[in-house]
C-alpha cells in the first residue's frame, strides 16, 4: 500500500500531532502489560535475593521469592513469567543429568508457581548450558557441539518441565530438529496442550554477557556459540528457520536479541503472520540502565520507547527484564 500525502497546505501532517487527544486517536501501536513476559533468575535457598552487578535492579531469587514475584506479576497484569536457573557448580556435569531431574530448581519453581498462582503462564528455558560443565547449550565431543545427542537430552528436559506444569516451553539451544522431536514426545506422552515458543532466530550475540553472569555461565563457557547460534549478518536464514520451526510444531517464534534485530522481527511477522516475540536481552537492559543511572537518559522514557519499538516492528510480545517496572508505569 502506497501512503497518500497531498501537497502542502491541503495536507499538514502536524495537524494530527497538535494535542494529546489527537495523537492518542491516531496512534498506530500501543504497549500494555499484556505484551510482557518477565524473565526471572531462580537460585537455591529460602527467602533470599542476590543482586546481579551487570543488571541493576535484577536479582536472583529463591523459589519462594520467585513465587512472590509471580503473584506480583499476575496482579500487575503480566501474563507470563519465564524461569532461568542459577545452577550451583555441583550440578554442572558432562552428562547434564540435572537438566531433566524432576526436582531441579526450575521444575520446583514451576510447581510452586502453579500452586500459588495458577493463572500466570509459566515459560521455561530449554538448553543444556545451566547444567553443562563447559557452558555450552549442547554436548561437546572433541570440541564439537553435537546435535542429535543433544536433542535427545532436550526432549527429556522438555518432558520433565511439562510434567511439572509448564505452560510454554522455550527451546533456546538452536540445535536442528529439536522442535519436531519435542513436539512428537509431548504428543505421545499426552501433553497435547503444552505450547512451544521457539527461540527460532537466536543470534550469536555479545549482548548476552550480563545474562551469562546472572546464571554463572561466564567462567564456564569455553569458546563461543557461533556453530549453533545465527550469524548476525544473516536475515533470509531467519525466515528459513521460522518456516522450519513452524512445520515442526512450534506455536510461537522468537527473535533474539531484540533492538539490534528489529528488521528480523518485521520480516518474520510480514512473511508468516504467526505469534512473534522478541527478547530484549540482558545487554540491552544493561545499556539502558547504565545510561539512566548516569543521568544520561531518562530511564522510564527509554524503557517505554524501547518496548514500543517491538510492537511497531510487528511483535506480539516482548521478553524483558523491565516487565514489572513497565507494567507499573503503564497501569498508572
Ligand atoms: C542460553 C540462553 C541465553 C539467554 C537466554 N538463554 C544466553 C546464551 O545463549 O548464551 C540470553 C538472555 C539474555 O541475555 O538476557 N540458552
Image (spheres, rainbow, N blue to C red):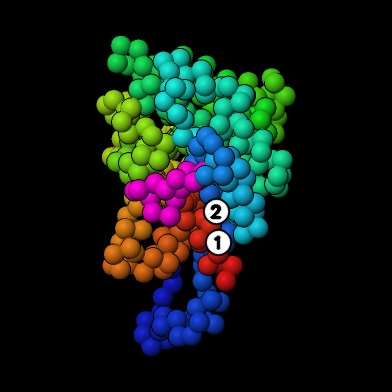
Residue at the image position 70 percent from the left and 21 percent from the top: 189
Q: Which percent across, then down, holds residue 202?
A: 40, 37
Helix, strand or loop under label 1 = helix
The residue closer to the viewer here, 153 or 278, is 153
Magenta stretch contains residue 35: no
Q: Which mark is residue 327?
A: 1
Residue at the image position 60 percent from the left and 54 percent from the top: 73
The residue closer to the viewer here, 238 or 135, is 135
Q: Which percent across, then down, holds residue 187?
A: 68, 24
Q: Which residues are magenta?
A: 49-61
Residue at the image position 69 percent from the left and 40 percent from the top: 114
Q: Which residue corresponds to mark 2?
A: 36
Callout 2 crowding tier (Cα within 10 Å): few <14, some 14–19, many ≥20: many
Number of marks in the rendered image? 2
Q: Quadrant of residue 195?
A: top right
Dots 2, 1 in contact, CB < 8 A? yes
Q: Is residue 144 visible?
A: yes
The residue closer to the viewer here, 242 or 53, is 53
Of the two numbered discs 2 and 1 on the same chain, state the one appearing first in sequence: 2
Magenta stretch contains residue 51: yes
Above or below — where is 172 with respect to 156?
A: below
Q: Which percent across, then down, holds residue 81?
A: 57, 46
Query: Which numbered mark, 2 or 1, is in the foreground of this view?
Result: 1
Above or below — where is 296 with respect to 171?
A: below
- What distance separates the C-alpha of mark 2 from that of mark 1? 8 Å
Above or below — where is 128 with respect to 305?
A: above
Callout 1 crowding tier (Cα within 10 Å): few <14, some 14–19, many ≥20: many
Q: Looking at mark 1, is its residue's CB closer than 8 Å to ligand 1?
A: no
Q: Looking at mark 2, is its residue's CB closer than 8 Å to ligand 1?
A: no
Q: Which mark is residue 232?
A: none
Amino acid at each position: 500500500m502506497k501512503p497518500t500525502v497531498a501537497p502542502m497546505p491541503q495536507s499538514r501532517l502536524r495537524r494530527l500531532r497538535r494535542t494529546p487527544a489527537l495523537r492518542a486517536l491516531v496512534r498506530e501501536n500501543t504497549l500494555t502489560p499484556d505484551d510482557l513476559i518477565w524473565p526471572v533468575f531462580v537460585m537455591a535457598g529460602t527467602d533470599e535475593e542476590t543482586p546481579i552487578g551487570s543488571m541493576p535492579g535484577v536479582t536472583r531469587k529463591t523459589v519462594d521469592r520467585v513465587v512472590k514475584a509471580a503473584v506480583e506479576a499476575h496482579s500487575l497484569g503480566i501474563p507470563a513469567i519465564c524461569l532461568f536457573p542459577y545452577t550451583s557448580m555441583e550440578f554442572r556435569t558432562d552428562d547434564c543429568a540435572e537438566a531433566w531431574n524432576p526436582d531441579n530448581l526450575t521444575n520446583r519453581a514451576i510447581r510452586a508457581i502453579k500452586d500459588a498462582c495458577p493463572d500466570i503462564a509459566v515459560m521455561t528455558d530449554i538448553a543444556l548450558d545451566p547444567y553443562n560443565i563447559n557452558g555450552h547449550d549442547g554436548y561437546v565431543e572433541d570440541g564439537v557441539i553435537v546435535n542429535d545427542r543433544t536433542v535427545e537430552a532436550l526432549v527429556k528436559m522438555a518432558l520433565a518441565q511439562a510434567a511439572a506444569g509448564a505452560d510454554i516451553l522455550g527451546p533456546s539451544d538452536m540445535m536442528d530438529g529439536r522442535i519436531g522431536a519435542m513436539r512428537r514426545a509431548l504428543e505421545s506422552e499426552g501433553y497435547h496442550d503444552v505450547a512451544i515458543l521457539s527461540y527460532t532466530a537466536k543470534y550469536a550475540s555479545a549482548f548476552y554477557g550480563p545474562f551469562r553472569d546472572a546464571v554463572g555461565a561466564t567462567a564456564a563457557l569455553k569458546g563461543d556459540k557461533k556453530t549453533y547460534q545465527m550469524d548476525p549478518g544473516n536475515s533470509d536464514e531467519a525466515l528459513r528457520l521460522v518456516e522450519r520451526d513452524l512445520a515442526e510444531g512450534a506455536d510461537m517464534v522468537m527473535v533474539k536479541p531484540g533492538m539490534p534485530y528489529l528488521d528480523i522481527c518485521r520480516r518474520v511477522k510480514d512473511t508468516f503472520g504467526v505469534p512473534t516475540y522478541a527478547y530484549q536481552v540482558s545487554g540491552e537492559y544493561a545499556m539502558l540502565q547504565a545510561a539512566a543511572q548516569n543521568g544520561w537518559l531518562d530511564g522510564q522514557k527509554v524503557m517505554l520507547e524501547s518496548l514500543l519499538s517491538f510492537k511497531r516492528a510487528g511483535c506480539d510480545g516482548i521478553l524483558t527484564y523491565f516487565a514489572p517496572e513497565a507494567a507499573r508505569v503503564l497501569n498508572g
